[in-house]
């Protein structure tokens, strides 16, 4: 991102759409990382089952109840591994944790680039070749609106044992 932003601002002759190519590249990395996160969640769920039913109970048996079926659940999961979370949940998790701020930086850089380096109105300077600036602006706006909705909409999280700000706030109230 730093290289793309630096190059985009290094000369007024450099095209603004290089920043949009950076957004597309970042989107590819988001999808790759979300796939990796889904695989990671399989292993984290297994470790969480052990933490809850072996380690926590071994440290203080009076503090909780052991799930009587935990061994069968863990055994079945080792025999037949399954994806625990949806692709949308994995993408939402990665958007909230890392990618929304990165997309925001690229959007801010792109907006500055199309407004500061062109004598034309910013809608016209957003054009790419034969594609009008209005089409580009609407497409970029829809992309960012979709990313914000996916990342921030209320949902039931299926990731087991994940620390989230909502969970921590709820624990403080108790």
Image (cartoon, rainbow, N blue to C red):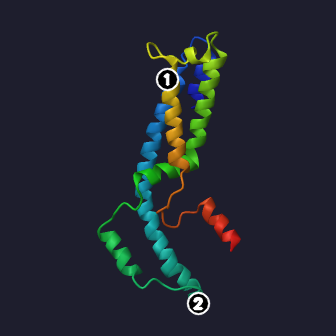
Left/right placement of residue 78 relative to residue 134 reads: left
- Quarter of the view holding residue 68: bottom left
- Give SS at disc 1: helix
Residue in front for this viewpoint, 103 or 138 = 138
Provide the residue designation for mark 1. 136
User: How many residues crowd around disc 1 within 10 Å: few (fewer than 14), some, or many (20 or more)?
Assistant: some
Q: Residue at x 48, y 27 (%)?
A: 21
Residue 9 visible? The answer is no
Give how far across and how far down residue 28 sits, in percent. Answer: 44, 38
Provide the residue designation for mark 2. 62
- In the figure, 85 relative to 104: above or below? below
- Quarter the N terminus occupies: top right
- Give SS at disc 2: helix
Of label 2 and label 1, which has the lower sequence position?
2
Q: CA distance from mark 2 to mark 1?
A: 61 Å
Q: Residue furthest bottom?
A: 62
How many labels were placed on the picture? 2
Give how far across and how far down residue 94 sits, in percent. Answer: 52, 49
């Amino acid at each position: 991102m730093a290289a793309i932003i630096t190059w985009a601002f290094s000369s007024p002759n450099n095209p603004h759409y290089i920043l949009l190519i950076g957004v597309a590249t970042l989107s590819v990395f988001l999808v790759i990382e979300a796939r990796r996160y889904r695989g990671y969640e399989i292993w984290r769920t297994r470790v969480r089952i052990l933490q809850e039913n072996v380690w926590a109970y071994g440290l203080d048996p009076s503090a909780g109840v052991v799930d009587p079926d935990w061994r069968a659940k863990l055994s079945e999961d080792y025999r037949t591994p399954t994806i625990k979370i949806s692709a949308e949940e994995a993408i939402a998790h990665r958007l909230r944790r890392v990618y929304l701020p990165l997309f925001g930086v690229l959007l801010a850089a792109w907006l500055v680039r199309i407004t500061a380096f062109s004598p034309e109105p910013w809608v016209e300077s957003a054009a790419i070749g034969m594609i009008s600036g209005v089409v580009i602006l609407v497409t970029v706006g829809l992309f960012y609106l979709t990313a914000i909705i996916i990342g921030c909409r209320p949902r039931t999280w299926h990731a087991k044992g994940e620390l989230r700000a909502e969970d921590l706030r709820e624990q403080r109230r108790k």
